[in-house]
Amino acid sequence: MAHFLRIAKSGSYWRWAELVAYNITIKWQDAATFFGVKTLPPPAVARELLTKSTADEMKNVVNYKLLRYMDLAMEPVRTGSAEESAVDDFAVHLLTLLDYAPRPKMASTRTDIPLKICGEIRHAKTDVCIVDSNNILLLIQEDKRHKEMKDPSPQLIPEAVATFQANDRMRKTRSRACIIPDFPTFYKIPITSQLADSVANGHYPTEPTVVHAHIPDIPRPAPCLSEGMRPLDNRRVILSCYTKHSRNS
């Protein structure tokens, strides 16, 4: 709202109040609406990843590493430890396997992006991002709710704004994915010049920004954070979402 107090904050300190202050809302969509297809494509992975549960059952070393990285990334969810690097390693391996970063794109970790906000410079740091030679194309943010009561959704917005400010401003920011750590939420964040300028100057944008988001429709939603992609039925749905998302990125 126009009367909300706006102060210069780095991306990691954004909460829902900042979204209200900059006229941003999140609208949840089902898979058909979000991805624009009636049926998701089959997962673009080897069959053994869809039929065998554990890393030790994998014959292919790439698939073995994916599930080992997944196990390490899921460890903080069970124990509350703070091994962020394990989540980053898993995200990079998964995105590479699903062809999010074909040549000349690259997966980069812990990228620090300057964020102009309220006339000052702060920072938005990604956990993982996909880049090409000129621009940041895709942002990945870890969900840290297993160790701190903080929703990751608001933190994606300043990262997208900072990316827009850094990229060619003629472009709109494209879809974003939030890793949780192996249970994702997918986002489409349409950053405009008005929103980027409003954040930069600490003003309320008259044009609303609607962020679209999707959570995979898995058989057992309640334990999604603790189960992730370990159960094969979850894994198939989630990897189908990733496959479609990678083709749109």
Image: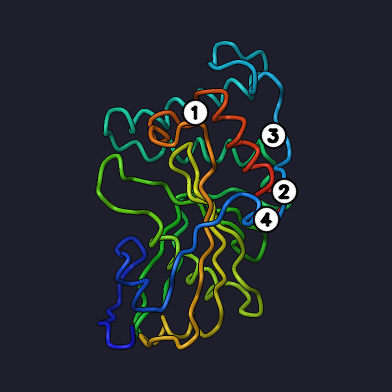
Q: Position of residue 41 (x, y in %)?
A: 73, 40
The image shows residue 112 at horizontal and vertical percentages of: 44, 61
- Taking depth in this image into account, of 165 and 48 the one nearest to the observer is 48
Q: Nearer the viewer, mark 2 or mark 3?
A: 2
Q: Kindly identify the amino acid type of the residue bearing the numbered disc 3.
A: Pro
Residue occupied by mark 2: 38
Instruction: State the CA–CA distance, disc 3 to disc 4.
Output: 16 Å
Q: Quadrant of the C terminus?
A: bottom right
Q: Nearer the viewer, mark 4 or mark 1?
A: 4
The amino acid sitting under disc 2 is Lys
Write the residue at 48% across / 70% down. Answer: 162
Quarter occupied by residue 116: bottom left
Look at mark 4 in the image and give the residue it sits on. 249
Q: Within 10 angstroms of label 3, few (less than 14), some, or many (20 or more) residues?
A: many
Q: Nearer the viewer, mark 3 or mark 1?
A: 3
In screen coordinates, is 54 left or right of 12? Answer: right
Reading the image, the residue beneath label 1 is: 69
Q: Which marked residue is nearer to the observer: mark 3 or mark 4?
A: 3
Q: Between marks 3 and 1, how big is the CA–CA gap?
A: 19 Å
Q: What element does badge 3 sit on? A: loop
Taking the spot 61% from the left edge, 49% from the top edge, the residue there is: 31
N-terminal-most mark, 3 or 4: 3
Where residue 135 sits in the image (x, y, percent)?
62, 65
Could you classify mark 4 by the number of other residues whose Cα lies within 10 Å: few (under 14), some (14-19), or many (20 or more)?
few
Q: Name the residue nearer the viewer: 15 or 85.
A: 15
Q: For the residue labelled by badge 1, is the local secondary structure a helix, a strand or a loop?
A: helix
